[in-house]
Every structure is written in C-alpha cells, then in structure tokens.
Image (spheres, rainbow, N blue to C red):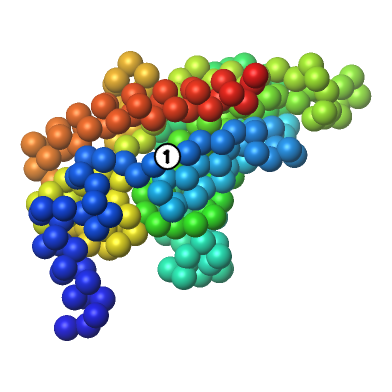
C-alpha cells in the first residue's frame, strides 16, 4: 500500500473519533473576512478559512443584455486556480473543479436573486451593466466553495456602480457612485461524508478521503436557494437533512460575520 493510501486510510479511521486538527465534526476553522482590499476594483474581499485563502474582485462594464432579458443586467462569476495556490493545481486551461466552483457560487447568487438586475439596465435592449466577479485562489487547504462564496458576496456588497458621464465614458473615480443593488446574502455551507461521518469545512486532506460532498446555499430567511452534490457515494435522506440543518445553523453565524465586515468597510 502506498504512503498516500495509508494516510487516507488513517484519516478515514481516525475521523470516527476525532479530526486531524482537533475540531469537532461540525466545527469550522477560524474565518477572517476583509473587504475593500483592491483599490482598482468596484468591490473586493479577501477571505480565509483556516489556511485556505481566496480573493475576489468585482469589476463592472457596459454591455449588451441577453435577448430574453432586455431590461436586466448581467452577472458573470469566474474562478482561477493558480499553481501558486497549491501543487495540486496546474497552469493552463480552466480545470473542471474551477468551472464547478464558479457554477456553484453563480447559482447561489442567481437563484437567491441577490442582485436586483433590473436596476442595472441603462437602455432597454441596448445597454446594461455587466458585473464580473473574479475569484482568485491564493492558497488551497480545503473548502474553497465556502471561502469563495463568502468572499464573492462580501465583494458584491461593497461594490459601487461607476458613473456614466454625458459623453458615455465611465468615471470610476467619481464620489457620486451608487451602491450595487444587493438585496440578499446567500451563504454556502459544505459538508463531506467520510466513513459514514458528516464533516463540515473539510481540510484538503479530508477532502481527499471524502465519499461524498454536499454544498447547500441558504438565504437570510433560512430557505435554501442552491444545492450541489459531488463524489461517488450516495447520501441518505437522513444525512441530507442533517447537512441542511447544519447549513441553516452555520450560515447564520457566517452571514453575521459578512455583515460586520461590510459595515466596517463603509465606516
């Protein structure tokens, strides 16, 4: 048996009684949220969960609306996994997990109607604001979806819409900029199934041992707006309900942290 397989087997057996860093099965690592960290962005945030480190910048530009939604602005979420963040990542075309990360974050924001996209219309059918949320992974030690989701919503909440001058140019420095119309705070909470045990906020080592992973994104009222399942093993109804309950509980704590960080940025 290879050393890697031995380590995985050890973690799978150990998880029944304790985790490698001493946390309980339902305990997050320390979370830090800093907003307004990029001067040239319309909004930005940097989030750490344990050693995982994610930076999100929000930029806005004028574009053409989709034909089926001529009065609505556009949100686009992109993520980049740099080899600098982890030896597990390689430079080149977007990785499958990078695309999945963007989709999960995008779905939570879109399905919760986080942004009032109707207020991003400049000229019906012709011009709307396009909102680009760019996720950059600075360091990877597990649970990137939660870290990226927290950073993205915090960045959006601090974003301001640039001013359009009479000649049509964009003034990003004008003090009369208006806040991006954010009306919801969706928070993703991810949990894995390891050897029959539900574990939240998995480390990189724990993720490699997981039989299944589920992310549930929760709104302010406690209702769910998105759900994503990965991994080869199925989850029972009881396990899904347990993860849903954990999501509701933990998202409240995290949402409070986001609101506090955003408020500090505006003061």
174 left or right of 145? right
Residue under the image location 46 percent in, 61 percent down: 95
> Label 1: which residue?
31
Work out whether 155 lies above or below 25.
above
Q: Quadrant of the N terminus?
A: bottom left
Return the x and y of residue 197 as percentages of the image width and height: 12, 49
Say if 170 sits above or below 231 in the image. above
Q: Nearer the viewer, residue 122 or 204?
A: 204
Mark 1 is surrounded, within 10 Å at the Cα level, by few (under 14), some (14 to 19) or many (20 or more) other residues, namely some
Image location of residue 133, percent across then percent down: 58, 39
The part of the image, by quadrant, that contains residue 9 is: bottom left
Residue occupying image coordinates x 14% and y 33%: 241
- Left or right of residue 66: residue 188: left
Instruction: Specify the farthest residue to the bottom.
Output: 1
Give the residue displayed 75% in from the left and 26% down from the top.
162
Nearer to us in this view, 49 or 159: 49
Q: How many marks?
A: 1
Q: Furthest-right residue in view?
A: 167
The quarter of the picture where the C terminus appears is top right
- Left or right position of 58 against 52: right
**Percent position (x, y) of residue 263?**
57, 20
Q: Is residue 183 visible?
A: yes
């Amino acid at each position: 048996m290879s050393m890697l397989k031995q380590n995985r087997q050890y973690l799978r057996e150990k998880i029944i009684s304790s985790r490698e860093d001493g946390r309980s099965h339902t305990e997050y690592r320390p979370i830090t949220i800093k907003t307004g960290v990029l001067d040239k962005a319309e909004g930005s945030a940097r989030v750490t969960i344990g050693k995982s480190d994610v930076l999100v910048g929000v930029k806005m530009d004028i574009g053409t609306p989709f034909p089926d939604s001529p009065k609505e602005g556009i949100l686009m979420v992109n993520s980049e996994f740099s080899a600098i963040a982890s030896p597990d990542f390689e430079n080149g075309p977007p990785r499958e997990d990078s695309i999945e990360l963007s989709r999960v974050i995008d779905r939570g924001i879109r399905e919760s109607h986080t942004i009032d996209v109707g207020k991003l219309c400049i000229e019906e059918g012709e011009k709307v604001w396009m909102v680009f949320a760019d996720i950059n992974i600075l360091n990877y030690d597990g649970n990137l979806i939660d870290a990226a989701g927290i950073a993205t919503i915090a960045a959006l909440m601090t974003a301001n819409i640039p001013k359009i001058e009479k000649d049509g140019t964009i003034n990003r420095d004008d003090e009369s900029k208006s806040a991006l119309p954010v009306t919801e705070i969706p928070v993703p909470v991810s949990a894995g199934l390891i050897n029959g045990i539900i574990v939240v906020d998995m480390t990189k080592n724990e993720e490699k041992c997981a039989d299944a992973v589920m992310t549930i994104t929760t709104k302010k009222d406690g209702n769910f707006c998105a759900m994503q399942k990965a991994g080869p093993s199925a989850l029972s109804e009881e396990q899904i309900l347990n993860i849903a309950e954990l999501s509701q509980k933990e998202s409240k704590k995290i949402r409070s942290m986001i609101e506090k960080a955003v408020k500090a940025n505006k003061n």
